[in-house]
Image (spheres, rainbow, N blue to C red):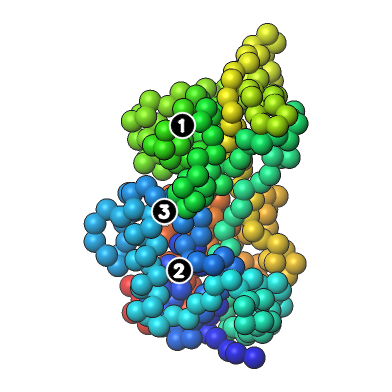
Amino acid sequence: MKMYDLIVIGGGVSGMIAAITAKEYGAERVLVLEREFELGGTLNYCVHNGFKSKYTSGDLTAPEYIYSLVEKLKECNIEYKTLANVISIDKDKKITAVSEEGILTLKANAIIMAMGTRERPLGYKNILSHRCAGIVSAMSTLKLINKRATLPGKNVFILGSEDTAIFAARSLILEGANVKGIIETTDKIKAKSPKSKQFVEEFNLNVMTNSRVTKVFGEGRVTGVNISKLDKNKRIIEGSKQYMDCDTLVLSIYMKAESGVAEELGIIVDKYGKILVKEDMQTSITGIFSCGTIVSGYETADKITEESEKAAIEAVKYLGTIKNEK
């Protein structure tokens, strides 16, 4: 069984920042486990700029930002494993994971959980449809366009106005699609990033607030949707239904925290699966900390960075090896 001072579960931006910070503050043997084939998490599907890194200068695009963190991991001699899926953790901080190497059994003195979130499926939205082609999530849209150079549709409505929805709209427009509208059930867009709000203005996006999709038409492929207006109690206003042609519906649905392995261990989570942490970013189990979207939900890069650094520093304090504390 291989021993580490600290194991970080999740190699997204939050996990990488936590690992680097922990190393800088005194942790010696640090390991990052990432279940995907590359580090970077969901930010791998984005290409927009506006990111700042401590480890390189300038206004960075998402790929450049990820690259700066990966290079810093290497510079700090932090071990990381991709395609390593954690399947169980016990209260003694023994981790079992499956990787290309086979079954890994690892032991840590402290753990940071930074597993992130995943998009929920269509079933979480009460929308009538024939489950036809042309219904795709916002994150999958970004992946198709920015990673696979594939346009999911030409005439598109987007349901939801979170940052991922705005980023998806931008990528669709830049690749030649017609984004006919962004449909939001509340009275204002939910995007938090200043960059997203800038995109809404720059691309003159049609944001349809207090509205929802009530039906998707099409059997082989989406052909249109019904859009209805909502009153202040989120009830459909009678007679407000309007049919609109489209060939694609992009869904930006509330992200589900990837906390299954934490819940199995007995770590306390909220009703959305987000891990509840104390002021020192420690979970309900001593020596296990957490940070990133699995704690805060979708947040700005600055806030995620701040929380990840804090979790790392507190983990190193717990280890008793803290140095260079500011």
Does label 1 or label 2 sit earlier along the sequence? 2
The answer to whether residue 267 is visible is no
- Residue depicted at x 38% and y 78%: 74
Mark 1 residue element: loop
Where residue 253 appears, x then y in whole percent? 61, 40
| Pointer 2 local density, CA inside 10 Å: few below 14, some 14–19, many at least 20 | many
Residue carrying label 3: 301
In front here: 305 or 183? 183
| Numbered tag placed on residue 107 in the rendering | none
- Residue type of the residue flagged with mark 3: Ala
**x 60%, y 90%: residue:** 2
Rendered view: 45 above or below 227: below
Which of the numbered marks, if any, corresponds to residue 16? 2
Marks 2 and 3, how far apart at CA:
13 Å
- The crowding category of the residue bearing disc 3, from other C-alpha atoms within 10 Å (few below 14, some 14 to 19, many at least 20), is some
Kindly report which numbered mark, 1 or 2, lies closer to the viewer in this rendering: 1
Asked which quadrant contains residue 131, the reply is: top right
> Quick one: label 2 or label 3, which is nearer the N terminus?
2
Position of 109 compared to 67: left or right?
right
In this rendering, the answer to whether 74 lies above or below 267 is below
Check disc 2 and give the amino acid type.
Answer: Met
- Report the Cα–Cα distance between label 1 and label 2: 34 Å
Residue highlighted by disc 1: 177
Look at label 1 and name its amino acid.
Answer: Ala
Query: Residue 283: which quarter of the image?
Result: bottom right
SS label for mark 2: helix
Quarter of the C terminus within the rendering: bottom left
Location of residue 187 with respect to 118 vertically, above or below? above
